[in-house]
Amino acid sequence: MLLNKDRLHARMVELQLDAVVATTPENVTYMSGFWAMPQWIRRGPQAYVVWPSPGKGEPEIVTSTATLDLVADQQIWVERVRRYGAFHVDGHPDDAKDPVSQRLLELQEALNHSDALSALVAALTDAGLTRARIGIDEIGLMPGQIDMLKERLPDASLLPAAGLFRHVRAVKTDEEIARLSKVAQIAERSIAAALAVARKGASELDLARAFHAQTVQDDAFPVLGCIGFGERSALMNVQPSDRKLRQGDVIRFDVGGRCRHYRADIARIATFGEPSEEVLRCHRALLAGVERACELIRPGVRVADVFEAAVETVRREGIGHYRRNHVGHGIGIDGYDAPSLTATSDEIIETGMVLCIETPYYQLGRWGLQVEDMVVVQVDGVERLMATSGDLTVLSP
């Protein structure tokens, strides 16, 4: 199971909530295991998970009839499913002999509600929650829908709960950590595959194709692929172009895929030929900043202290004017989970957090450098999820 149930229930008790409702694609998948494809590929489609507090009912998925095949075909730990809307599929029980088709036929026999909010109101009503305190993940709703819910549930207290879900997701379960470790190492292999085609005249797009091909070969999906050469490596969100590789170029990777819903985000630097002394000095400083942050991170440490230590280390080790708005972030089912490693954060590091620790540095028109590692917080410090280090790689022209 992905869901950290103990952490969720503790937070619900703290906030005196009788139930929570997940609405965003990340939170629906996190709460139930249900990947509602339409939610992930465009704005608008609605799917929910209603999760009552212990002793106040069973969790329930609310989704469109058009996605019931996904419910039937996935490993989902929420058994109750409520559907809405019309979608027509011909079929006869005598023809549906495989388990997925049989399950789909069963789901299609359930009561059908006219629209998503009607189904959600019915789920809350059937659970006896019409006078309850309910936390609503407000981000996944469309404009006006929260007001419509308040009109239909006038005796319920509907409270914004996007922050609750972000808090709960910050500490990962063992299954989540295993998935994150796997996708991190897929990203590393994909970088190696890209560097294997790095030769004079190869383009950024050539390396991107090799990178993403390896990602797919390893049963993950492309998501993040910032790959830039030379002056383009200093573009923060560089997208691969037909720019050709030249001797002396810096190659910056800020990349990661998605595997079984979980994200990778890592950064590595290579040079095509021997790097300049300035590139070596700056890269060493950035790597020292990441290493210092990793030395400091452990349960109970203030996020703001990690930020300060990383930035001050980079300055001391070679980039005296170094500035950053953050030096990392949580990662999981979302690319930017809590916490955000900023100077102003009041968050505290906890066991089980998975963090991306990063120290990018960009000199426009020249080059960009970046070190970024994925780590999991253990009782006595961090465990790296990477098989490689952030050392600079030098390629022979």
Image (tube, rainbow, N blue to C red):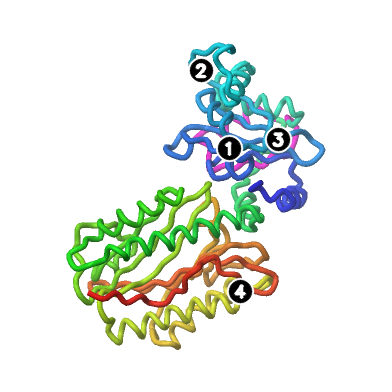
Element under disc 4: loop
Which residue is label 1 attached to?
34
Closer to the N terminus: mark 2 or mark 1?
Answer: 1
Element under disc 3: loop
x and y percentages locating residue 14 in the rendered image: 76, 52
Quadrant in which residue 197 is drawn: bottom left
Closer to the N terminus: mark 3 or mark 2?
Answer: 3
Residue 86, disc:
2
Alpha carbons under labels 1 and 4: distance apart: 33 Å
Which residue is label 4 attached to?
297
Closer to the N terminus: mark 4 or mark 2?
Answer: 2
Residue at 38 percent across and 54 percent down: it is: 214
Q: Nearer the viewer, mark 3 or mark 1?
A: 1
Alpha carbons under labels 3 and 4: distance apart: 36 Å
Q: Is residue 66 left or right of residue 378?
A: left
Residue 59, disc:
3
Q: For this rendering, which residue is in front, 167 or 243? A: 243
